[in-house]
Structure formats: structure tokens, C-alpha cells
Amino acid sequence: MLPNFKYVRPGSVEEAIDHLTSEGARVHAGGTDLLGCLRDNVFGALKVVSINALDDLRGIRQTPDRGVRIGALATITQVENHELINERYKGLAMGASEVASPQLRNQGTIGGNICQKPRCWYYRGEFHCIRKGGNLCYAFGGENQFHCIFGSDKKCCIVHPSDIAPALVAFDARVRVSGHKGDRLVPIEKFYVLPGEDVERETVLEAGEIVTEIILPPIIEGTRSSYRKVRARRSWDFALAGVALALVLKGGKVESGRVVLSGAAPVPWRSHTVEKVIIGQKLDSKTITRAAETAVHNAEPLAKNSYKIPLFKAIIEEELTKIAIG
Amino acid sequence: MGKNCDEKTCNCKKGVSRRGFFSSVGAGAVVLATTGSFAADSPSKVLEPDSTTPITLLVNGRERRILVEPRWSLLFVLREKFGLTGAKAACERGECGSCTVLIDDIPRYSCLTLAVEAEGLPITTLEGLMKGEELGPVQQAFVEHDAFQCGYCTPGQIMAVEGLLRHTPDPTLDQIRRGVSGNLCRCGAYKNIFAAAQKASELKRGGGAK
Amino acid sequence: MKASDKPYYLRGIPVPETPAPGKELHPWKETHVIGKPLSRADAYQRVSGAAIFPSDTLLPDMLYGAILRCPYPNALVKSVDVSQAERLSGVRAVITGSTPGADLKWTYLQGSSTKLFDPHCRFEGETVAAVAAETPYQAWDAVQTISVQYQVLPYTVDERSAIEPGAPKVHQPGNRVGQPEKYQRGGVEKGFSEADVVLEQDYRTECELHTPLELHGCVAKWDGDQLTIWESTQGVYGVQSKVAQVLALPLSKVRVVGHYIGGGFGSKLQPGKYTVIAALLAKAAARPVKLFLSREETFLSCGNRPPSNMRLKAGVKKDGTLTALQFSVTGTGGAYPAGGVSLVDWLIRDLYTCPNVQTEAIDIFTHTGPARPFRAPGHPQGSWALEQMLDALAEKISMDPVELRLKNIPAFSQARDGNPKYTTTGLRECLETGAKTFGWREALQRVRESGRAGHIKRGVGMAACLWVAGGGGPPSTIIIKLFSDGSANLNMGASDIGTGTKTVMAMVLSEELGLDIDRIQIENADTGTTQYATPSGGSKTVPTEAPAVRAAAVHVKQQLLAMAAEDLKTQAANLIIKDGEIVAASDPSKKIKITDVAGLKKRGVLVGVGYRGPNPKNKVTNPFGAQFCEVLVNTRTGEVEVVRFVAAQDSGRVMNRLTYENQVIGGITMGIGLAMTEFRVLDKNETGKLCNKNWHDYKLPTALDVPSDIVSVPVELEDSEANSTGAKGLGEPVTIPTAAAIANAVYNATGIRVTTTPINPVQLSLLLSEAKIKG
């Protein structure tokens, strides 16, 4: 059951920000993650600030420079089905289509999705773990089959749960963050925080700041993208391993692009090592095999998640092969 | 409504119901509109904790005024306050779908929707699919294909199928399976649910029913 | 429905002959209603929202209850302070173990006894205190303000380490639940020495949780000293007796109603502490209380299918003759005796002909929630071991796995004293029919020919089974009332847990009296108004209740014919019922409409009482089955897609083709859960707490995890001995062989034998990569 809280639904972004600067205020967009966290007592809320009256935050449209602007309140279903996104940013549409369940995609927003809290069962459960202000990450010595193989900084081994964020990183999207001091545009790669920097937060959002929109840069000619996710069951499940690709192919070679892993690290994990192997190369089977090997080279599997090593290799190989074929 | 127009600026918004917002891209694809919006010019809504505030919910075509606490879920209000027990409580954490209702014609989990967040939006529950005492086409199809056992997840399954068919009248098997993939059935009647959804699609298209 | 819309078999149903009073009923030679694919008698209620499930109950002035549970797997409750909770707004009652009247005894199996609120909490989720308040939100607020001092004790939650020396003891004498259960026939050593091939393998099935969709709980209401409980239960009489016992009330003062139940699968065969707690809260507050557990609480405290650690050694001759089976299993029913290894070895003992068998079952206490029977207790676990072993043996002796099973079909029950025969045994027919329907040989051939190309591999697998029970038996009492207009009321204590019990019983009545189904009203599952019945479970409801319904219908018929005989001035033995009329067999012009029978008109209602008679002596009634499946395996990622299933089940007579099919589909779906998605995770190293107590972390199969291609082929053997309907149980056998069949198919596709559930990418991707390295 949900605890008590005050509810406000402001009529403007400024007002919402005012409310959110107060102690114990939490933002409510689709509410799917917030209400789950409140039920599980992951954190409390003195005030729930619904931003659902802020119609400026809705909608998906083309920007003057032929990029795309997605309002933070666009639902995941809207992202999944939007024609422009399917045409140009296929990997993002694919990521959106893999999120949770139809109802949650209908209700959840893209802003909420990229800001969602981790799904670690210790974090969500009755464990006073390090991310909740305790001094222990239970997963390191515990049940860590669904935890990370990169980026734990030896502090907290959650994986970032979003299927959308890796695709956004692959496309080099920017996140508009609005707060008291005005707006700032944060490249989504810089939006996330590793445990080593601050174990109690997942994003750079400060108190009173909200995500208002996401900007996708214009697509580069020759871009091919995809998102592939392996899960323990076929619906309503987070990634055991996933990979978002956005590669620019010219003359048979990878000219530029990004490879981003989900289910791998506390943040969407950009695999610079794979990018290094494939950029400037033809995507032949030799390169692909080498890329897959490299991907997990520096991985630090835990006692129960070493399966992620062959799994990431497999999907990177599969997806690069598909991209190569077109 | 143009294919890629922005809801906020699009002219086609005017003079049509919310359902007019829905556009489709490509054959068989679905675009669902935002799950409603509150008029931006309305003053801020404030509900104090531990006390109740009147709100108006539009349930199955009827306006119903109710005093709610801010934390009350739409599911709680439907079941325990309105006695509309078609929507079932089973997980109350957005993981099973038995509480599924249509909000603005879109299937959503009423357990993860605050009642106050559904203010002013058209809500359809299982009871709202009935025409008097007569079953709606999806319900009929569920009977015919024995698409349930214990019947507890059934209202949610029916609402998920209803929502799917309102936007995708002639779905493929894959679309059906995806459409009900947010609804658990522990008795395991999925195969029959798929068949019922196919039948319901035929009934709806053939019978001209909504 | 207009009369003209009726299917042919509902128009003027011919009625079977009526035996003279005292004569035994034999199964129908021919049926006109039974076996048809009829929609459920309560389908309208279940799809319209008209069905009021216990959790839908709303009573005037009703409060909501919530329970405070121990967050530790092993702790002593030193003190409980409820003062803050009592002061909260909306709170109307708070109870703890020291509340007058709440210091009550609670018993488990084998006389194991504890308290309703026991100061020693031996599993996470044990009850500590409870609250009733005006809203469930306020009740939960209050629960959270209760301050408890616990002395946290060391725990042991994994049965594999609980019997090691030094493991914390769950109960003082130690962590073994009694002596190991042993069984032996012949001599296994001799058997192994006669074998051409001997294999030995460890297997494990993970702990599964029932998690029916409707939460566990009830609404309790007192009227003076009369207690009424609306409970989500598989058996109202079971709840009645336990509540009456715990509260020391006469049975007559406890009425339990459970018209609908949103799934149970064994976890609602018994009441929980919540039932008694709801009654105590309602008493304390002097108002009705609705107490349904949260989903998370049901994961902790409402039972499970225990994990099974199995070892099986098997010997076979080149010709396929099984020579020896040696099996051991350890498991845990949790913190109290609850059948932790119950029936896991039954298939090893009894499914195939084998002269030399030895089994041992060791049940171990752990600091975990007590088990409850879960659909075919023990059997899917034993099947996981035995049926994979058979598959491996077949490969070793280069024999088709179907063939190997056909070689070892038993003619009688080997594991029971006196080796009784089965009333019918369809194992052979299930294997043959299933293989034929599936296209087994062709499918195997296709897999062989598809060869090594590509990383998506196809595989096929099969497994067979029997279910230890499924014959039903006494007691059951049924009352049928025939009204003067020819409509009838069927009154039965049993619950319809979703299997279609009500529908099947209405069909039996319809068959016997020639009534339209829609003229039958069913009253069931209410201790106040219906007859005694055992809980619905164990695949025994149809074979138990249907013969009693038939007997009651025949009782009505006999009285009706006797009355008509007076009207027609003839002998009752000379009369038959046809098209709603009673006709003299010798002179068809001599007839009377049922509704014109003077005795019926005068009396207003004719009452027939039927009892379930005894089962045949020195015979066993068991259902059998065989399932076949096809999978696609991504050999890089370990993703498995189940493409299709064929189930050939011998459950005797098919009572309703539609609900029969549904049971098969459901059993396979649940088996897919065991095989591929479900497992309980305990934080055994650090806290002993349950990690996955919700439906995201504990994964039930979704619509995308099951095939839409599931074919059920009933193997309908005539069983003239089992009971007067010839029906055997169905609900359990349909889920027994599923998981093993999938494992065998995965082996067929990949050459990897997955011996621990679940077969998911977590496990399989690793096994595949290791296999690749080994080459």
C-alpha cells in the first residue's frame, strides 16, 4: 500500500520546479516507477508533484535541423510507434518496443524511463543497501545473477534497467533538464552517474530539476541501428544482456557510430572497445568476432553472472552480422 | 490528424473527442495518444495528505464524484468505493494486468494509476463493455473459446483485448500475443485467449459493434 | 438462447435407463451431453464481472485488515508495542499474541504445534500482529508503526546445507523431519549387474511458488456467536473445520462461503492464519473485516513446491528392459512438517516395469515458509529426473525413447502392496497416439537432417507420466431438487477452482434427467447451505463428485418414475424418460409430461440425494499421459522457444471436451513455468530473506512464453470399474511430464543435458559456451 503524501499538479514547469525543490518532493509522470518505489518503501515522498498538466512536455516532432524532439511526457508506446522514429531511429523504436508490458508502455513516459530507479532486488527489497544510505551492497556476496559485469566501481553492482537509454546513447541524444537556474542540455552519455561518483544517485539531476525533453540529432546518411535484448522471459522483463547499435556505414565500412550495452553496468554502457575495433573496418566475420571478444574483455563477472560473458559476445556478434547484411 | 503532427499544435484536435487524437502509421500499426492531459490553463490541483478531496471520475460514461485521498489508486476506488469489482486486485504493483481498464481507450493498470490522475478522463471497466445484461463481443468470444479457467485474470485479459481491438481491429496472432503479454494467467489459458481475441475481432468487424 | 439455436444434443436429450432402487450404476454406454464441448455453466458470470469472488466482497461497515510479519528468517519476538498504531486515525482493532483470546494454538502436519502469533518466528513472513482499520491504506500505516523488538537468530534456508554439522537448528532435535522415507523391491545391485548400460545423474528442480491470481484471504463477519467467512478457498469445509478447531467453536457456528476462487493450485486447500486473524479482528472491532494478503505476503507464507535435489541411477539392457532404478531425494517443506519430499519418488517406483527399485527421501527443516501441496505434488520433480534418464538410456542403447517406454509398460501397480491392477491403464495408448499425432518419427528425422547449419537448432522431446491419485472416492453428498416446472437445483459442497466442476456436474444432471443446462441452477461451496465435500484438488473432484451427482439424479428419477407409474397405472420399471416426457416402453401412447406428474405437482419439489460409493476393491485408478514437444534453441544465447506441444492423456471419459482441452493447455503452460521461467531466490548468504517476492522477479510464463500450437488428444479408454461415470482425474497429470519433455527436446537440439531447472539463457548460455570450449 502507498504511504501518505501530498499531491500537487502544477500548471507550469516553473511551478513544478518550485514544488520539487521542497523537501521530500518526488516527480510523477507516468507514475509506474514512482508508485512502485513508494510501495516498496525504496524512498518516501512528502509531496508527489504530477507533471501531467504540462502539455508542453508532450508530443514528438521534427526539429528545424531535421532532428527529433521527444517531449518528456511522450509515452513509450508513442515512441515505439512514431513514424519518424521508426524511419530514422529504428534502434530507439526497437528499444521502446522491448520495455515492460503493453500497459506500462501506454502509461510510462520516456522521461520517466530514462530516470527510472534500478531493479536490483536488494535495492527494491527490505535491505538497507549502500544505494539507500546503508554501507553494504548485498549483491556482491549474494544473489547477483542479474547484476552488472562492468562499472560497479566495487561499490554497487546494479544494472541500469532502461531499454531506451542505451539507444538514446547510441544516437547521441541530449536531455533537456529544467530547473531553477534555467535549462541545460546534457548529452545523455553524461546524464548518468556511476557508483564511484555517487552511489546514491543514478543521474545528474539536482533537486528541483526535471527532464523536459529529449533531442535526437539529425540522422547521418548511412546510419543503421538496432536494439537486441535477451531476457529470462519474453514479456515484462529487463535485459539479461542487450545491445543498442547506431552505426554509420559508408562504402562497406563503419565510418562512425556507437555500441551501447544494457544489462551490463549501472549506466547504459558505451563499449568504446568494440567501437574501436569496428570503426574504419569492414564488418566481416573476422572483425565481428574480434569485436565480440573485445566487448567482454575487461568484464568483471560476479559469482553468479558469468553467463553474461558468452551472452554479450553472442548478441554483439548476432547484431553486428545483421547490421552488416543490412 | 496528420501522421506526424504534434498533438499540441495540431488543428485536428479541435472539435473531436480524444479518440480523434489517435493516428495510425502503416498498416496494422498502432499509435496511442498520450493518456490524456489536464487543461494547462486550469489552476494547480492540490490534495492534502491524510485527508480527502472531491474529484470527478468519468466511469463507463457516467460522472461520479468521490472523495479521495491522494494516495488512493484508481483500482481501489473502482473496487472498494464504486463496487465495480470487474477490475481485480492481484499484485497492486503493475505486474499482472488483472486490474486493466481502458483510460482514454488505452489499456492501463489501474493499480498503478492514482485516482486523482484519472480525473476527467474516460475510464472503461469490464462492466462498461456490457450492453445492459448482454455481453460485449470480446466477452462473448471469451465464453465461446473457454478463454479462462478460474476467471480472476479474465476481466483484465478482456480489457487488454478490447483495447487492442479498438486500435487494431484486425490483429495478427503476434499482435494479439503482444497485446495480452501484460496480463498473467496462472491457470495458463493463453492459447484460448489468443483464439478468443481472434474471434472477438471477427465479431466486432462483422457485427459493426464498437 | 432461443430453443431453435440449441445444438442438436440439447434438443430432447435421450435419457439413460433408470436402474431399480438399490441397483448399482454402471458407466453410460452412450452419452448425449457428457463429452460435448459445452461452454461453462458460469461463463457469463466469469466474463461479465457478475461473479463475486471472495476478494470482491463488500459488506456494509466493513473494515480492512493487515498483518505485521517478521522480516527475519529466524527471530524471537521480545516485545511488541502497538500503542502508536492504536492511536492512528481510522484504526479500529490491533491484536497481538498477548491480546486476550488471540493466544491460540496452530498446528501443522505430524502434530507439530505452534502459536497463531508465535514468539519464535521460524520463517520470514511469520505473523506477529494485525490491525483492522477503515481503509487498507490506514491498516498498512498502522502496521508500520508497530514497534517490535526481535532477537535475531542464525538461520539456515538452504536444504543442501541445513543438514551439515553446525547448521542452525530450526527445531531442537535437529533439521531432519523424521526418519528418511525408504522403499525397496528386489535388489538394485543385482539389477545393475544385469544391465548393459548403467547411468547415474544428479538433478534438481528449483522451488516454485503457486501465486494464484486471487490473493489469499477472506472477509469475516460475526453475528453474535455465529461467524461467517467468505474465503478464497479450494474447500469450504476444510476452512470450517480448522477455524472451528482453532477458535473452539462448534462447526455449526462457522459458515464458510467460497462461491468463486481465483486460482489455488493446492495453496488454498487449507486455510491460513489469516482466516483466524480476520475473525479475531472482526470480533475485536465488532465489524466485518476484509483481510486479503498483499502479493508479497503470499510469496512468503502461502506455500510452495519444494526444491528437490535428486540422484538417479538406472540400469537397462540392450533390448530396453529396465533392470534397476536407485533414487534419492532431499528437499524441504520449510520450517514445519509440510511434505518437503512427498511423492517425489512415486514415478520412479511405479511408472515403468522394473523389478529392482530402491528409493530414499529425506525431508529437511529450513527457515523458510512451509510448503503446501502444489499441483501434482512431487511428480513433476520426479519426472524431471526419471524422464530425462529414460531419454539418456534410450540414446545409449540406440533405441527410440518412445520405444523404450513402450518396452516397460506395467500391467499393475508395482509399488503398492499386493500389486493391484489399474482399473484402466492407457500409458501405451498415450505413447502411441501421442507419437502419431505429433509425427514423432518424422520430427526426429527432420531434426537429424537439419544438421549443423545455423545457430538456431530445432529439437523434439517427449515424456510420459502417471498420477498417483486421480480416482477420487468417498465422501461426497449431493442433493438435487427437481422443481415442478422441470427445472432443477444442484447442490454440492465442492468448489469449482476453474477446472469446470460446476459445468461438468450440470452436464451429468442434464444427461440423466434430460434437462437443458440452462434450466439448472448450481448452489455450491457454502458450508451453510451445501453438503460436505473434501477440498477440490488432487485431480479427484470430477471422479468424486460426478458419481454422486449421478446417483442423486437417478434418485430423483426413480421417485419421479414411481409417481408417474401411479398416474399411468403401470409399473415404474416399465417407464423411460424421453424428450421431457415419461413414456411406457411397451406402449408409447401411454405417456405423461414430467411437469404433469401429479406427485411432483403436489409435492412442489422432488429431492434426490446421492452419495459417492466406495472405489473398487483391490484395484487402483490412476490417470496416465504422454507429452511431445518441439523447441527452437538459439545456441549462442541459450534462448529457447517452445514451438508446439502434443498431449495424449488417459483420464478416462472426457466429460467436457472444452474444459478438458483447457486443463491440458493450462497444465502445459504451468510445466513451461517449471521448466523455463520460475525459481525462488533466497538471499542465503547474508540475510536468508526472499529476494523475489513479486511477479517481476519471480517469473510466471507470459503470453509470449507459451506456444499457441498445443494439441490435446484424449485417450478415452472405457473404464467400467473406476466409478459410475468412467472419468479419472485430469488437472494434475497434464502438468507432470511437461518440463522433462522440454529438457529432452533441448537436449535433442543441442546435445546439452540441462539437469537443473529452469532452462533459461542464464543457465543455457553458459552451458552452451562451456560445451563449445570443450568442443
Image (tube, coloured by chain):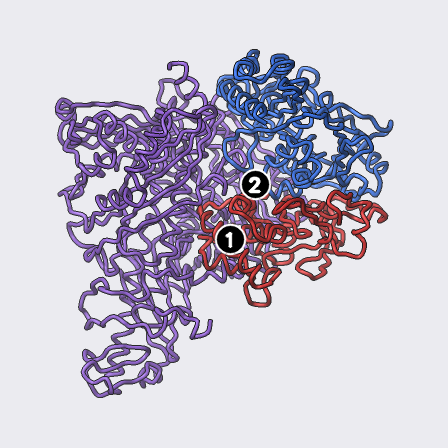
Question: In the picture provided, is C412 more to the left or to the right than C130?
Answer: left
Q: Earlier in the sequence, mark 2 or mark 1?
A: 2
Q: Nearer the viewer, mark 2 or mark 1?
A: 1
Residue A136 rendering spot, x and y as whole percentages: 60, 19
Mark 1 is surrounded, within 10 Å at the Cα level, by few (under 14), some (14 to 19) or many (20 or more) other residues, namely: many
Q: Secondary structure at mark 2?
A: loop
The image shows residue C142, relative to residue C230, as above or below, that is: above
Task: Give the amino acid type for the residue marked by disc 2 in the picture.
Answer: Glu
- Badge 1: chain ID: B
Relative to C245, is C325 on the left or the right? Answer: left
At 53% across and 24% down in the image, what residue appears?
Answer: A318
Q: Quadrant of the C terminus of chain C?
A: top left
Instruction: Tell me where residue C150 appears, x and y as whole percent.
Output: 54, 29
Along the viewing direction, whichever of B137 and A3 lies nearer the viewer: B137
Chain C is which colour? purple
User: Which of the chains is red?
Assistant: B
Q: Position of residue C482 (x, y in %)?
A: 35, 74
| Distance from the alpha carbon under mark 2 to that under mark 1 | 25 Å
| Residue marked by disc 1 | B198
Residue that label 2 marks: B95
Residue C8, relative to residue A83: is it above or below?
below
The chain to which mark 2 is attached is B
The label number, if any, that marks residue A115 in the structure image:
none
| Chain in blue in the render | A
Residue B50 at least partly seen: yes
